[in-house]
Image (cartoon, rainbow, N blue to C red):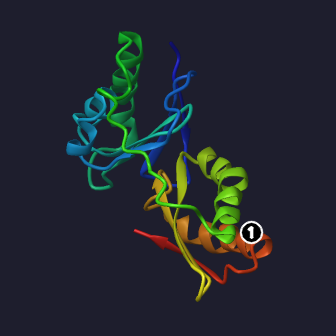
Amino acid sequence: MFIQTEPTPNPNALKFLPGREVSAEPREFLTIDEATASPLAEALFQLEGVAGVFFGADYISVTRDPAGLDWPQMKAPILAAIMDHFVSGAPLLRGGAFDGASPDGEDSEIVAEIKQLLDSRIRPAVAQDGGDILFDAFDEETGVLSLRMRGACAGCPSSSATLKAGVEQMMKHYVPEVARVEQVI
């Protein structure tokens, strides 16, 4: 098994590509307690310096503690943990431990349009950088769209610019009801 790595715009996150499907649904782990839902995430959190793990469709983004080890020191143990996991054949998640978003009713036409645009145009581009972007809320009175950044995009120095220059402009163009885009932390 050969695992490739790619840098991300976030200097504290690195993207690992195992050459196979990782997760049908994006999943993020920000603490060791959350990581117990996944044997792979748990193994990665046990390595020194790991501060976050994100599973994308065909990649794993690992975020390091900026005050900890540097990537040259962390890369080999992370590669070994990923390889060991996939070679073992263990499931990605323990016992159906996925808490995917459950629909809480029907979306308005505007919200449905926003979500469709996120899924078709924005999320694939953000995934290229090792992250994900999720709909959080839309206030139809003020036109404020709240989005949540995950994976390598959470905490990335350029995430604010991505939201304002990229996402906000695209949303305003295709969904005129959107006046402003904000990041939910």
In the shown orientation, is residue 103 left or right of residue 79? right
x and y percent of residue 77 in the render? 32, 27
Give the SS element for disc 1. helix
Question: Which residue does the image show at 39% across and 36% down from the upper left?
Answer: 72
Question: Which residue does the image show at 56% across and 31% down from the upper left?
Answer: 58
Q: Nearer the viewer, residue 129 or 127?
A: 127
**Residue, disc 1:** 170
Amino acid type of the residue tagged 1 in the rendering: Met
Question: Which residue does the image show at 56% across and 38% down from the upper left?
Answer: 6
x and y percent of residue 131 in the render? 52, 49
Question: Which residue does the image show at 71% across and 71% down from the upper left?
Answer: 171
In the shown orientation, is residue 47 left or right of residue 141? left
x and y percent of residue 42 in the render? 26, 33
Q: Is residue 3 above or below residue 6?
A: above
Quadrant of the frame with the C terminus: bottom left
Q: Residue furthest right?
A: 173
Q: Is residue 70 above or below residue 79?
A: below
**Crowding near the residue tagged with mark 1, few <14, some 14–19, many ≥20 C-alpha atoms within 10 Å:** some
Q: Residue 160, located in which quarter of the rendered image?
A: bottom right
Q: Is residue 28 above or below residue 21?
A: below
Q: Nearer the viewer, residue 125 or 69?
A: 125
x and y percent of residue 142 in the render? 58, 88
